[in-house]
Image (spheres, rainbow, N blue to C red):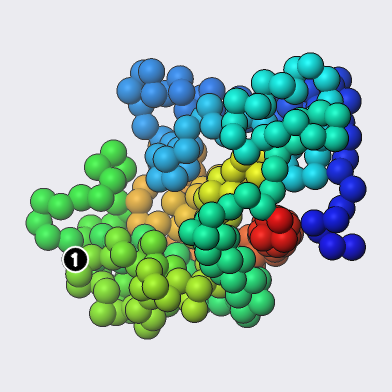
Amino acid sequence: MNAALAAPLLLAEPDWLARRRAHEARVHAWADPHQARQSRGEKHPVEDFLWEYYSYRPSWLRRWHPGPDVVLLGDAAREYLRWPEYVEADGGVRVQCGAFDAKRRESLAWLRGLLRATAERPPQFACFGLHEWAMVYRLAPGEVRHAQLPLRFPPAEIARIVDALAIRCSHFDAFRFFTPAARPLNRLQPERATTAQFEQRGCLHANMDLYKWAFKLAPFTPSELTADCFALARAIREVDMRASPYDCTAFGLAPIAIETPEGRADYERLQRDFAERSQPLRARLLALCERLLAG
């Protein structure tokens, strides 16, 4: 059936309020510790990253939206009319799809292409998390990237490890943070304009970005999907930092020693798992793009 012709799902007020409460409780478990740390001026290299790098506030993630083709019934649903994307229809309130200007439709089409290409491109598993190492490779004296975290090795040893291993980073938003000395060592030279040509699901950061794409489609994204993407990104960030040159043991994170064959095997095993876990989420986002473009 054409997505644009799908019959809407009518949700009684008690049912959608229960879904909203469940979503809010899920997000509170992630957001509350972060906000408590903020109030104390404390930092956490894993837990804080998703809020700070992607710049989406906890209050935004707590908001519940049902997604397309769902009608919220009952008087309480009228609160959703504060967002311009919502309209009264089918005896309740629903998000209205298809009322996009040319620029938004162009963005949707680009994202659809990116998600499809990433899903279909064979994943690569030989980068071993060296992007984080490349970000501190031969830094100028006095320069640091994460001042609150000590390095596991002195700078000369980090340089030796990077020089001994091939850097194969396909993700532009990681590559752009490489030091000038590390950039020429990367076998790929991704650019912002060529993102869709390089992105592949073996990349930890490409899978973390599913959270970003879910938010870019808000308020049309079902909030459960956004939360699922956040949960995956959170798990990936932990592995990202464990495989980095930073010492995160003070936060209970044992290193994945990618400088050893055993550590690289551990990293690849986790990388393959994330590649598999990302595919259903990517498919749901791709279907959402298709639905929004269908109008």
Q: Position of residue 287 (x, y in %)?
A: 73, 60
Task: Name above or below for residue 59 compared with residue 161.
Answer: above
45 or 282, which lies in front? 282
Q: Which residue is mark 1?
A: 138
Q: Is residue 87 visible?
A: yes
Point out the image quarter for the N terminus.
Answer: bottom right
Residue 135, by quadrant, is bottom left
- In the rendered image, residue 289, in percent from the top left (x then y), is placed at 66, 59
The residue located at (28%, 46%) in the rendering is 146
Badge 1 crowding class, 10 Å Cα cut-off, few under 14, some 14 to 19, many 20 or more, is some
Q: Amino acid at mark 1?
A: Arg
In percent of width and height, residue 152 lies at 32, 53
Q: Residue furthest left?
A: 141
Q: Is residue 60 above or below residue 166?
A: above
Q: Is residue 117 left or right of residue 54?
A: right
Secondary structure under tag 1 reads: loop
Residue shown at 83% from the left, 20% from the top: 74
